[in-house]
Amino acid sequence: MSARRNSRVVVGMSGGVDSSVAALLLLRQGYEVHGVFMKNWEDSVDTGYCSVAEDLSDAEDVCETLGIPLHKVNFSEQYRQRVFAHFLAEH
């Protein structure tokens, strides 16, 4: 277990159950856990699902409860250009 105490892992946090439980289990195993929230859409895009703001809020709540830091990165422009635009062009 001592080797794990010096091991940092990064968990992609969506605010959902899977990433939250993964972070919790890694903490329980002694890892230093950092959460990362990746913003892939602009806030103004209404997909009919949870908004970016709701997902971020959920991820923040989980990380606060677990006592781990949450790092936020904005990939919305890169995602639009490299993933979504390619998908639209192919379909």
Image (cartoon, rainbow, N blue to C red):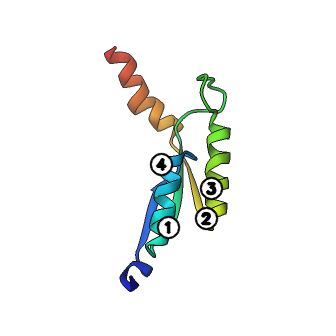
Q: Are marks 3 and 2 in contact (CB under 8 Å)?
A: yes
Residue 9 as seen in the image, left or right of residue 52: left
Mark pair 4, 1: CA separation = 15 Å
Mark pair 3, 2: CA separation = 6 Å
- Name the mark on residue 66: 2
Identify whether 28 is placed above or below 71. Answer: below
Mark pair 4, 3: CA separation = 12 Å
Q: Are marks 1 and 3 in contact (CB under 8 Å)?
A: no
Could you tell which of marks 4 and 3 lies nearer the N-terminus? 4
Question: What crowding class fits label 1: few (fewer than 14 Cα within 10 Å), some (14-19), or many (20 or more)?
Answer: many
- Location of residue 47 in the rendering, given as x and y in whole percent from the top left corner: 58, 23
Disc 4: which residue: 18
Disc 1: which residue: 33
> Disc 1 or disc 3, which is closer to the eye?
3
- Location of residue 1 in the rendering, given as x and y in whole percent from the top left corner: 38, 82
Amino acid carrying label 2: it is: Leu
Identify whether 34 is placed above or below 56. Answer: below
Q: Residue at x 61, y 64 (%)?
A: 66
Disc 3 element: helix
Disc 4 element: helix
Mark pair 2, 1: CA separation = 9 Å
Res. 26 image quadrant: bottom left
Identify whether 85 is placed above or below 77. Answer: above
